[in-house]
Image (cartoon, rainbow, N blue to C red):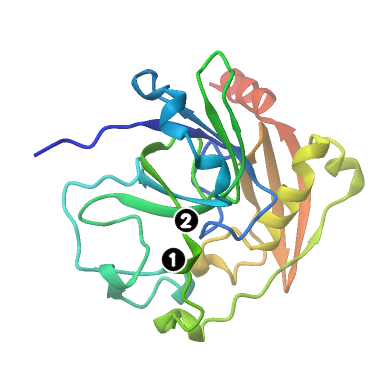
């Protein structure tokens, strides 16, 4: 049997899992780059790809590989207290740690020192995630307007109001601000922590540590520090 090989990795603004949108396409403003492994840097493999608006990415939950699997999991959107069958969820804790994401193709850049690269929008992947395959999204076969969403149809997904003081927002590069605000509005907290009004959370994004609190329906950013500075402070304490 042929072994799965990593054909590419993706570069995103998320160095860790916390804060990544729970599904692809929820934050369209996110920008990512797909870089192929040396053995797959052949421009002819991308011939015709420019004609498609969206792509399917098949990838590995590289941070969630487990020695054993469980037939049931606790979806965060159900509060982390209700068990569902693993095959009825998109949990990363699966018999085979494979993820599936639909992203929008922005451009195919063919002349780089790393071979051809793909620029995409709306990815829900951590930086450095290995990709096993890329397939075009085909509307006539992949779009099902009459589809039902099972237990997810009954879940309310409220957005948070984001209070981002201008002095702190200006520390974020201008081309990253809209995506960050949208990520925060999606409420990156674990579902089972949503009632903890006094806790301070932190999300690593685009080279910055963004700290925030949530009270009622408002998320307030309280600190923005470059990750390089945060790492230096940690090193000094150690």
Q: CA distance from mark 1 to mark 2?
A: 7 Å
Q: Residues within 10 Å of mark 2 (few under 14, many from 20)?
A: some
Residue of label 2: 137
**Residue 47, image x, y percentages:** 47, 34
Please, is residue 50 above or below residue 232 in the view? below
From the viewer's perspective, tell me whether residue 155 is left or right of residue 87. Answer: right
> Residue 69 vs residue 183: left or right?
left
Q: Nearer the viewer, residue 125 or 193?
A: 125
Q: Position of residue 167 (x, y in %)?
A: 91, 41
Looking at this rendering, what residue extends furthest in the left direction? 1
- State which tag comes first along the sequence, 1 or 2: 2
Report helix, strand or loop for mark 1.
helix
Answer left or right for 125 relative to 163: left
Residue located 59% across and 58% down the image: 188
Quadrant of the image occupied by residue 7: top left
- Which mark, residue 160? none
The N terminus lies in which quarter of the figure?
top left
* Secondary-structure class at tag 2: loop
Q: Residue most toward the bottom? A: 154
Mark 1 Cα shell of 10 Å, populated few (<14), some (14-19), many (≥20): few
The foreground one among 27 and 218 is 27
Viewer can see residue 128: no
Q: Give 232 or 76, whichever is nearer the viewer.
A: 76
Residue drawn at x 65%, y 29% is: 227
Label 1–label 2 contact, CB within 8 A: yes
In percent of width and height, residue 183 lies at 66, 54
From the image, tell me which residue sits under label 1. Answer: 142
In the rendered view, does 163 fall on the left or right side of 102?
right
Percent across and percent down for residue 144 are 46, 75
Q: Which of 52/89 is in front?
A: 52
For the point 50% across and 19% down, which residue is it? 115
């Amino acid at each position: 049997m042929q072994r799965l090989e990593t054909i590419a990795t993706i570069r995103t603004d998320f160095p860790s899992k916390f804060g990544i949108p729970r599904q692809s396409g929820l934050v369209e403003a996110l920008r990512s780059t797909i870089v192929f492994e040396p053995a797959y840097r052949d421009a002819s493999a991308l011939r015709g790809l420019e004609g498609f608006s969206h792509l399917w990415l098949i990838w590995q939950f590289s941070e969630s590989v487990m020695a054993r699997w469980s037939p049931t999991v606790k979806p965060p959107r159900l509060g982390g207290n209700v068990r569902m069958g693993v095959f009825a969820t998109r949990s990363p804790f699966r018999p085979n740690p494979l993820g599936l994401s639909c992203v929008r193709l922005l451009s195919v850049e063919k002349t780089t020192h790393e071979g051809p690269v793909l620029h995409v929008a709306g990815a829900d992947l951590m930086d450095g995630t290995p990709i096993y395959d890329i397939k075009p999204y085909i509307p006539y076969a992949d779009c099902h307007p009459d589809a039902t969403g099972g237990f997810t149809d009954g879940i309310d997904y409220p957005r948070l109001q984001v209070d981002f003081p201008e002095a702190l927002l200006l520390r974020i590069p201008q081309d990253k601000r809209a995506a960050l605000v949208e990520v925060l509005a999606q409420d990156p907290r674990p579902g089972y922590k949503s009632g903890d009004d006094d806790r301070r959370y932190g999300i690593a994004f685009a080279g910055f540590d963004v700290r925030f609190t949530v009270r009622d329906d408002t998320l307030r950013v309280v600190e923005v520090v470059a990750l390089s500075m945060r790492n230096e402070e940690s090193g000094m304490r150690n």
